[in-house]
Amino acid sequence: MRHVVAVDQSTSGTKAVLLDEAGRVHGKAARPHRQIYPRPGWVEHDAEEIFDNVVGCLSDLARTALDAVRGAACLSLTNQRETFVVFDRASGKPLHNAVVWQCRRGDAVCRDLAAAGHAERVKDTTGLALDSYFPAPKLKQLFEDEPHLRAAVLSGKAVVGTIDAYLVHRLTSGRVFATDHTNASRTLLFDIERLRWDEGLCELFDCPSPALPEVRASAGHFGMTDAGGALPTELPICGVMGDSQAALFAQRAFSPGSAKVTLGTGSSVLLNVGHTPRRSRSGIVTTVAWVHEGRPTYAFEGIINCTGATVAWLKDQIEVLRTAEESEGLASGLPDNGGVYLVPAFVGLGAPYWKEDARGAIVGLTQHSTRAHLARAALEAIAYQIRDVLDAMAVESGRKLVELSADGGMVENAFLIQFIADVARVAVRASTVPELSALGAALAGMLGMGVHASLEDLERLDLDVRRYSPRMPPGRADELHAGWKRAVARTF
C-alpha cells in the first residue's frame, strides 16, 4: 500500500496528513498560525511562521509514522488560494507579511479601475470579478504603500507568489519557483483560455510577469524536498492544487453538472462546467478546476466570504459561544430562528452580490432573543448564502442542481448540513473525511506518480459519505429565504 504525505496550508493553520492510495487517513499533525489585523479590513499572516509550521508538521508526522513517510510516493500540497507573498528570489525569505484573501486593502484600486472601464476586460480574460478578494488589486496597493517592495520586484531581487509557489520555493531551497493552474487562475493576472499570464493585466496591476512563477499542471512534478531534514528522505513534490479545487477533485466531480461546497473559514461552491469556459453575468465567477493531460476543466464558482468565520466571530469576538461545536446544540434546541437573521458581511459580500461596502447586521432581535438565536442565525446564514449561489448557478447553467457534495470541518454539524438541504432544496452528500482538500491534492499526486492510472481509477475509490435529503416544505424554505434576502438588502 503506497502512501502520500499531503500538506494542507489553510487560512487558520497547517496540517500534514498521511494518506494511503485508497484515500484513508493514517496520521496527521496540525499547527495554527496567527491572524494579523494591521487595520480594519486588512488581514495578514506571517509567511515565515507558515513555513516553520509546515516543517514542524512534517517533522511531527514523520516521528509518528516514520516508515510510511520514508516510503511515501510523494509530498502533495494544497493551500489557501488567493493569499500571496512577496519574497526574496534567492533566499525565499518573505519581505512582507502574506496578504490574505480576506484583506480588503485593494478596494480603492478596484473602484478606480472599474471607473476607468477595466472591469469587463478583467472578467473576460480571467473569468473573475474585479474585486479585492483576489490578489492583483491588493498587490498594486501594497506596491504603492511599500515602494521598496515594488523596487525589489522590478529589479528581479524579489518575486510574487501564492502560498503554494512560496512553499514550493522554500521546500526546494529555491530550485523550483512554480505554481499550478488552479492557483494561477485566482490572481486576476491569468488568461484562463490561453492558460498563461496575461501581459496586459500584469501591466494594469503593476506586476511584471518575470516576477511570477512558472505554471504547471496539478499532477506535474515540482521538485524534490526533505523539508530541511524534517522528512527522513527526499520526496518528489507532486500534486499541487488550490484548496477548493482540490476538494472538488477529491469529490471526483469529474463530470459537467457535478458540484461541491467546502465549508471552511469562507466557502466555495464549485460546479463543473466542462472543457470550455463559460462567462457568468450573475455574480458567479469562472475558474480553472484543473488541467489534466494538457486539457483544462472549468468550473463556475460562488465565493462566500464568511461561513466558519461567522461562528468564529461569535466565539472569539462576541464571546457568546464557548466552542464552535456548541453552535449545533444551541441551534437545534430552538423550534425556529425567532425571526433573527445574521448577515455576515464583515468584509463585504461575495457571490452573487459582490458588494464590498456591505457591512454585517443582525436583524429581527426582540427581548426574547437569546445567544441560541444568534448561534442559529449564524448557521442559517451559511445555508442561505449557499442557496443564493446555487440559484444563480441554476440561471447560468439552465438547470437546477439536485445533489451537492459537501466537505470541510463544518460537515460534522448535522444541523447545518440538514438546513442546507432544506433551504436549498438539494440532496447533500457530506464527506466523512474532513481532510478532503488534502485528499484531492494527494489524488493528483498519485496520478502524477502513477499510483493511480486515470480519473476512472479515482472514481472507483470507495469514500464514505453521509446523505441528507430535504425535509422542510418548499413553501417554508422560500419564506425563510425571503426573510434572509430582506436582511441582506439592509446591509447595502
Image (cartoon, helix red, strand yellow):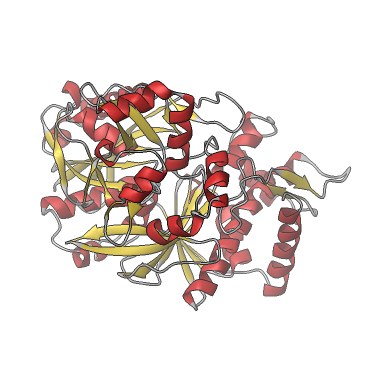
- For the image shown, how many numbered marks are present on the structure? 0
Horizontal side of 167 relative to 104 (left or right) equals left
Q: Quadrant of residue 193?
A: bottom left
Q: Is residue 443 above or below residue 104?
A: below
- The residue furthest front is 116
User: Where's residue 239, x and y in %?
Assistant: 22, 47
Nearest the eye: 140 or 370: 140
Q: Residue furthest bottom?
A: 398
Tell me where residue 48 appears, x and y as whole percent.
34, 22
> From this viewpoint, is residue 387 visible?
yes
Q: Is residue 435 visible?
A: no
**Closest to the observer, 289 or 251:** 289
In this view, the residue in front, 45 or 23, is 45
Residue 362 drawn at (x, y percent): 75, 45
Above or below, 44 relative to 438? above
Residue, x 21% and y 67% (percent of image)? 456
Give coordinates of residue 6: x percent, y percent: 26, 40
Task: Give left or right: position of 42 versus 67.
Answer: right
Q: Residue furthest right?
A: 367
